[in-house]
Image: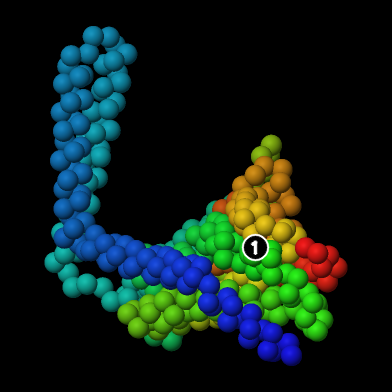
Amino acid sequence: MLFRLIINELKKIFKRPKTWVVFALFFVFILGLNIIGYKSAKSWEENSKVENRIKSEQDYLAHEKNNLKENENSFKNAQTDKDKEFYKSEVGFGKDRIKEIENTIKTLEKEKNNPPKTWQEEVKAEKKELTNRLEELKRQENNIYTKREEGHIKREIENNDYYLNNNIKPVDKFGFSIGENFGIISSLLGLGILAAGIAVFASDIVSGECTPPTFKFLLVQPISRSKVILSKYISIVLTTVILIIGTQLLITVLGVGIIDGFDTLKSMVFVDQRYEFIKQGAETILMPIDATGKYVTYGAFLLRGFAMQTLFVIAVTSFVFMISSLFNSSMMSMAVSVVVGVLGSATMSIPYISKFADLNFLSYGDVANVIMGDINQMHNLENILPQTGIIVMIITIIVTYLIAHTRFVKRDILV
């Protein structure tokens, strides 16, 4: 009986024009973000070519030479000693900048005449620079900053060895790849876009039965109210998960993988970095904690990312479902869901409230940065952790459903 109720609810959901409109908008949104990412990567690739870098430096050189002439004229025409001193220093700085640019152009010209480096050569060169920097740090005073930089450099060297030993090309951070695109899209969805979209889509799943008033037909059926509300809940959760996660899997994983290849999933990304506040004189600074964080493949990162995003989608849907069960007006339930969803996603940026952001399930919408740990650095926090997020979201799902269930089974039949 429950299975039949779920099927009936799914049919009702997919017969609604709103379902297909929301799905189309989300599909276009995700597709558009990936297209923008592709064009940005191509633009970066084009601008990174030696010929274009030389042209950019030449344009910069011409600009600086014009500035130098203007400052030299201003120095000649200066009326006071103060002005003369100022323009004299500007002329000196200008000449130094011009020399630096000219040296850069000479270096790029030499690079242009040499064969392009392979990614293996670039990784080896980076490893050499890191090793040299590590030796410098060992000669410096051993303090909290040098100690942490040492730890970071050692991890980077291990990462370079992984690429070289396994013959795996690193992902270009400004390139077009599955992992990088997922991270960017996750950040945007976590700003409240995903919560607002689910609110618009699912806010009338229960309250919509009031307009037109079909509640009494539901409540007089020879079926327990518990099964009715559970069937509605399961059907709307299934729909949101399939539409949101399915769309991203189709476009960001399969689509990008077909264009760029799936080898980037073997590349590495740093996750689980934790932070703490440390007193430095009169100042309190957020610093990474030693011995936290590790490198995992982008494939493993994506599995964790989509699993956590699925849990987030279920938590948001459960919250919206609860709101829908509390109001008789679908417009009111939508308005409340959207406002709470958007404002709730911004709690990490609100002073005094941000210290409790770890207890708000909406704080974990940017799943990529939550898993990496960068979310804390972005908002100057130390307590937004994946493990905490999973617990908070599971509790949110259970509590919101119980409230919705209790409200529905005790509802007056004269609604």
Q: Nearer the viewer, residue 214 or 343?
A: 214
What colour scheme was applied to this rendering of the protein?
A: rainbow
Q: Residue at x 65, y 62 (%)?
A: 211
State the quadrant of the N terminus: bottom right
Q: Residue at x 29, y 26 (%)?
A: 89
Q: Residue 252: which quarter of the image? A: bottom left
State the quadrant of the C terminus: bottom right
Q: Residue at x 23, y 63 (%)?
A: 46
Q: Position of residue 98 (x, y in %)?
A: 21, 40
Residue 124 vertical position relative to residue 68 in the rendered view, above or below: below
Residue furthest right in the image: 410
Q: Position of residue 376 (x, y in %)?
A: 62, 56
Residue 5 vertical position relative to residue 410 in the rendered view, above or below: below
Q: Position of residue 236 (x, y in %)?
A: 63, 75
The residue that label 1 is drawn on is 211
Q: Residue 147: which quarter of the image? A: bottom right
Viewer can see residue 306: no
Q: Residue 78: which quarter of the image? A: top left
Q: Nearer the viewer, residue 313 or 124?
A: 313
The amino acid sitting under disc 1 is: Thr
Viewer can see residue 72: yes
| Image position of 115 (left or right of 187) | left
Query: Circle 1: is it few (<14), some (14-19), or many (20+) Cα within 10 Å?
Result: few
Q: Residue at x 16, y 60 (%)?
A: 51
Q: Position of residue 230 (x, y in %)?
A: 74, 78
